[in-house]
Amino acid sequence: MKRGKRYVESAKLVDRTNLYDVEEAVGIIKKTASAKFDETVEAHIRLGVDGRHADQQVRGAVVLPNGTGKKVRVLVFAKGDKIAEAQAAGAEYAGGQEYVDKIQKEGWLDFDKVVATPDMMGFVGRLGRILGPKGLMPNPKAGTVTMDVTKAVNDLKAGKVEYRLDKANIIHVTIGKASFTEQQLADNFQTLMAAIIKARPAAAKGQYLKSVTLTTTMGPSVKVNPAKVG
């Protein structure tokens, strides 16, 4: 695969054979972010579990102390007083059947996160085929199926991120922007890693953190020493 000049120059800053401490990795990541836009910084964590088994699933959510740097548009499925509560908390959209119809009939997806009160899950369940593959389906483990709509919306606006295994047993999570300070990125990263380590399934055997890398949107990946995180 042919790489651009900017990527090639950035890659020279990374020793592919080295496992970096968190502070070193974050410093390099900031130097490799040379695009004309504010690149997103992501963490990719490969775990020593088998997600095909229910007792080895790893899934949850954590509020990053410095947010993600992205404006989050929240849709809340609710009824009665909970609609006004969601709007007061800052949700861009709040309602019931009208939003189910809008998504089903118009393919509307102008939102980033979805919250639902438990009594609305019967309606929201119909959207599983649409929201599920996009990672937008509300989930009790992520705190997005709840009667405490205010907290759910506030957490999402503040930088709450979900983590879950993909089919290759890797977790992919945004931890900020290249414009963040090194300290902000490091704090976000360590907060995420602490949550993932705490979520280790009892059934997991052997080495839990197989590999940990940081990347920017356009830059090379930087390997982090798994023994130095969390």
Image (spheres, rainbow, N blue to C red):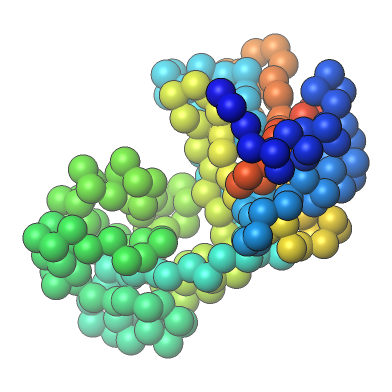
The image quadrant where one finds the C terminus is top right
158 versus 163 height, above or below: below
In the rendered structure, the answer to whether residue 5 lies left or right of residue 156 reads right
Q: Position of residue 37 (x, y in %)?
A: 63, 61
Residue 221 at x, y percent in the picture: 71, 33
Image position of 71 (left or right of 228): left
Residue 26 appearing in the image: no
Residue shown at the point (48%, 68%) measured from the top left: 72
Quarter-of-image position of residue 16? top right
Please state the total of marks drawn on the protein image: 0
Q: Position of residue 139 (x, y in %)?
A: 38, 50
Q: Residue at x 38, y 84 (%)?
A: 87
Q: Position of residue 2 (x, y in %)?
A: 59, 27
Q: Quadrant of the N terminus?
A: top right
* Viewer-closest of 197 and 213: 213
Q: Is residue 137 above or below residue 166?
A: below
